[in-house]
Image (cartoon, rainbow, N blue to C red):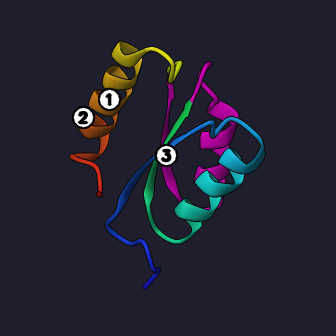
Amino acid sequence: MARLDGKVALITGAGGGMGRVAAERFAAEGAKVAVIDVEERPEVVEAIAAAGGEAITVAADVRESEQVEAAVAKTIEAFGGLTT
């Protein structure tokens, strides 16, 4: 059993750099991951899926509260909630 089985994570800046590393690591540990970046990042979702994980991608600018709210709503819709 992985450390994050059954957890749902929303990771901002997950399109590249440390955010992508975090998204891939959370998924490797069993979390379902919402990959959030200013543009959708299907390549990150594909990499996570290829490694056996589950993820979605959502475009959101974290400087815009309504976009963040929409990203949270899409994550909850896809995975049934968020882990706090």
| Relative height, residue 78 to residue 64 (above, below) | below
* CB within 8 Å, label 3 to label 1: no
Element on which disc 1 rests:
helix
Element on which disc 3 rests:
strand
User: Which numbered marker is on residue 74?
Assistant: 1
Distance in Å between CA atoms under marks 3 and 1: 12 Å
Q: Amino acid at mark 1?
A: Lys
Distance in Å between CA atoms under marks 1 and 2: 5 Å
Query: What's the magenta region?
Result: 37-59
| Relative height, residue 58 to residue 3 (above, below) | above
| Relative height, residue 39 to residue 55 (above, below) | above
Q: Nearer the viewer, residue 15 or 64?
A: 64
Residue under numbered circle 2: 77
Element on which disc 2 rests:
helix
Mark 3 is surrounded, within 10 Å at the Cα level, by few (under 14), some (14 to 19) or many (20 or more) other residues, namely many
Quarter of the image with the C terminus is bottom left
Q: In which image quadrant can residue 74 be found?
A: top left
